[in-house]
Image: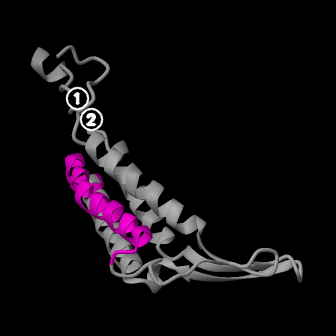
């Protein structure tokens, strides 16, 4: 009779905070792949203005690869939220690949900024390539994905856990 009145031990709570954060970072990486990454900017002090032509991330093959890495990261994060939180740690692979692809975009390997020229004719005309905010956002998201997916591997001790 007394055994029936004893409370059952509580199941250990699984922490899904890192999986949720990996999912959010993956969604932001997908969003940043659509934003402008680079462009050409022409300025002239003679007319007192300038013209800019932007390239979105998905206009370049490296941007498409980054978009796919973000979608795979989103899937890893969702799998970590639904099944096991450590599945979110698999997102380190697409996050690391996104970092490599973003660096390759800027360095000019296989396209990217390689075909853009820089021309400076003093006060008359200045044409130069510029890096836009979307590339910096994608870089920050890829770094966050790598960091959060590594942190998802480690189990934080519970409040009452002594081991």
Q: Find numbered disc 2 in the image and state the secondary structure of the residue it sits on.
A: loop
Based on the picture, tell me whether residue 117 belongs to the magenta stretch: no
Residue 85 is a magenta residue: yes
**Residue drawn at x 20%, y 33% as measured from the top left:** 11
Residue 7 in sight in this render = yes
Corner quadrant of residue 39 = bottom right
Q: Which residue is mark 1?
A: 10
Point out the stretch of residues depicted in magenta: 81-109
Residue 4 in the image: above or below residue 88: above
Q: Is residue 154 above or below residue 31?
A: above
Count neighbours of disc 2 (C-alpha within 10 A) and say few if under 14, some if 14 to 19, many if 20 or more: few
Using the image, determine if residue 106 lies above or below residue 99. below
Circle 2 residue: 13
Q: Which image quadrant is residue 129 in?
A: bottom right
Q: Residue at the location (26% across, 60% down)?
A: 76
Toward the right, the furthest residue is: 47
Count of marks overlaid on the render? 2
Q: What secondary structure is the stretch in magenta mostly built from?
A: helix
Residue 117: x and y in percent read: 55, 81
| Residue 1 in view, yes or no | no
User: In front: 60, or 159?
Assistant: 60
Q: Position of residue 10 (x, y in %)?
A: 22, 29
């Amino acid at each position: 009779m007394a055994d029936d009145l004893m409370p059952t031990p509580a199941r250990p709570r699984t922490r899904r905070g890192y999986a949720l954060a990996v999912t959010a970072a993956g969604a932001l990486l997908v969003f940043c792949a659509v934003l402008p990454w680079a462009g050409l900017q022409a300025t002239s002090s003679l007319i007192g203005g300038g013209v800019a032509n932007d390239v979105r991330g998905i206009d370049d093959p490296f941007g498409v690869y980054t978009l796919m890495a973000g979608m795979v990261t989103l899937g890893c994060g969702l799998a970590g939220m639904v099944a096991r939180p450590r599945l979110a740690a698999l997102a380190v692979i697409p996050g690391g690949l996104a970092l490599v692809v973003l660096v390759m975009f800027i360095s000019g390997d296989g396209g990217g900024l390689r075909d853009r020229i820089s021309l400076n004719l003093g006060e008359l005309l200045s044409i130069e390539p510029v890096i836009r905010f979307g590339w910096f956002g994608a870089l920050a998201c890829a770094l966050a994905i790598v960091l959060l997916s590594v942190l998802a591997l480690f189990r934080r001790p519970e409040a009452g856990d002594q081991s």
